[in-house]
Image (cartoon, rainbow, N blue to C red):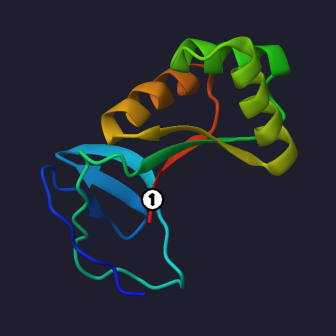
Amino acid sequence: MPVQKVRVHHTITKTKNGIIKNSGKSINVILLMQQTEEITSPVDIDTTTSGFTLILFNDAHHEFDEVINQVMLATGYGYDKAESITLEAHNKGRAAVIAGELDKCLSVQSVLEEIALRTSIEVNA
């Protein structure tokens, strides 16, 4: 499936190592494709759309309550929703935390990563 260019307000370019460059600032984003292929030209992504999802990955280094509290702090979610996200990450290896504009995902991601939780931001297809 070829990568399509979309309307651009901020240009983001995928580099060879999979890091996305945005005006000199690096962010981790996984581009979802149906098949593996190397991107040889820059990919433009409209960062003002709601086309991004923040993913939390399971790890063996944090207690459940610590992760739940950090998810609550980062998102403003109540205990039950934060617990549900934490349990999904634990049981399935990953869980969607929030979907929306890139800036919102980056803001939540930075709070989660304050305690070294593993996250990534995916571009929705």
At a point 87% along the width and 44% down the height, the residue shown is: 91
Q: What number of labels is visible? A: 1
At a point 83% along the width and 39% down the height, the residue shown is: 90
Q: Is residue 84 above or below residue 55?
A: above
At mark 1, the secondary structure is: loop
Q: Is residue 43 above or below residue 38?
A: above
Q: Is residue 35 left or right of residue 61?
A: left
Near mark 1 (Cα within 10 A), the count class, few <14, some 14-19 or many ≥20, is some
- Callout 1, which amino acid? Asn
Viewer can see residue 113: yes
Q: Is residue 28 left or right of residue 86?
A: left
- Residue identifier under label 1: 124
Q: Is residue 18 above or below residue 4?
A: above
Viewer can see residue 59: no
Find residue 68 and report its horizontal and vertical position in percent: 73, 18
Q: Is residue 68 left or right of residue 8?
A: right
Q: Is residue 39 left or right of residue 24?
A: right
Q: Quadrant of residue 42?
A: bottom left
Q: Quadrant of residue 19?
A: bottom left
Find residue 11 and report its horizontal and vertical position in percent: 17, 56
Q: Quadrant of residue 3?
A: bottom left
Find residue 75 and report its horizontal and vertical position in percent: 53, 20
At a point 60% along the width and 17% down the height, the residue shown is: 77
Find residue 8 and report its horizontal and vertical position in percent: 14, 58
* Of 79 and 31, the residue lying toward us: 79
Quadrant (top left, top right, bottom left, bottom right) of the C terminus: bottom left
Quadrant (top left, top right, bottom left, bottom right) of the N terminus: bottom left
